Image: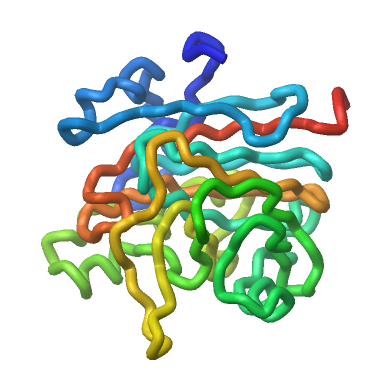
Amino acid sequence: MTIDTLTAGTPVITDSAGRTPTCPLPLDEVLDPTRYAEGTVLDLAGPLVDGPVVRDEVVAARAPWSVRLEKGQVLTIVDVGGNQSGDCLLFNADDTGERYSVPDTLAWQANAYVRTGTVLRSNLGEPLATVVGNEVDRQDTIGGACSKESNTLRYGHHTFTEHACRENFLAEGARYGLGVRDLVSNLNWFMNVPVEADGALGIVDGISGPGRRVAFRAEKNVLVVVSNCPQMNNPCNEFNPTPLRMIVTDPEGER
C-alpha cells in the first residue's frame, strides 16, 4: 500500500482548553521527516491481520483519533516513528457506560502485561477486544495517561499550557457525548512501563521501533478513542512525538 492511498485522520493539535480540533494538517506534512528529531525513521508498515481494509489513516504527532469498530473487525496500530505511546480507551459502542477496565483485564489473565492473547475486558468483566498480534514484548496498561495537572506537578508550572492525553481524550470523546466522568484508566500501546522486582513501576526508554505493530479484534461493537501522546517531558516517546497509522481490517469480509 502506498502513501497515496492513505488519508489523514484527525491530524490536529488541540489547544489547552481541549476544544474540538478544527485545523487538520495535510498528510504530506504529517509524514515529512524534517518535522521530527534528526535521524527519525518513519515506517508505515501495514496491517497485521489480513482482510479488506475499511479504514486507513495516519494520526499526526500529539493528535487525538477515534473509530467505531464493528464486532469482528481488527484495528492495527503502527508505531510509525518508534516508541510513540498511543494512549487508548475502549467503550461498548452501543452503551458507553460499559468501558475498558484495567483491574478486570489484569485479574482475569493474572498478568500485569498486555501481550498477544490478552482479552481486554470491561467494567462488567465482558470481553471488549482481544489482542491478536503484537510486535513488542509487552504493552502497558498500568502507567495511566498524562494530564496538564500531572505534567505541572512533575515537570514544572511552565508546562501547564502543554495539552496532554487527558485533553486529547476529552476533545475526541466530546464527539460522542463523553466527558470527564467517562475517563478511566487506559492502555498505553508501545509505552514501556516495567514492573520492577520491588513492585515499583518504571517509565523508561521504549522497546518499540519504527514500523512495530499491535492489533486487536473487537469482540462486540467497540468505540476506540486514542491520544497520540503529546508528552515531551519524559522518555516514553524519546521526547520526539511521531505519527501513528491506524488500519481497520475486516477478516470476515465485506459487511
Quadrant of the snapshot with the N terminus: top right
Residue 97 or residue 71, whichever sits in front: 71
Q: Is residue 155 left or right of residue 138?
A: left
- Residue 190 in the image: state x and y as whole percent: 45, 52
Q: Is residue 135 left or right of residue 126?
A: left
- Residue 77 in the image: state x and y as whole percent: 55, 40
Residue 183 or residue 86, whichever sits in front: 86
- Residue 90 in the image: state x and y as whole percent: 64, 56
- Quarter-of-image position of residue 109: bottom right
Check the image and name the residue furthest to the top. Answer: 4
- Quarter-of-image position of residue 143: bottom left
Q: Is residue 154 left or right of residue 251?
A: left
Q: Is residue 154 left or right of residue 77?
A: left
Quadrant of the snapshot with the C terminus: top right
How many discs appear?
0
**Residue in view at x 20 percent, y 58 percent:** 233
- Res. 169 in view: no
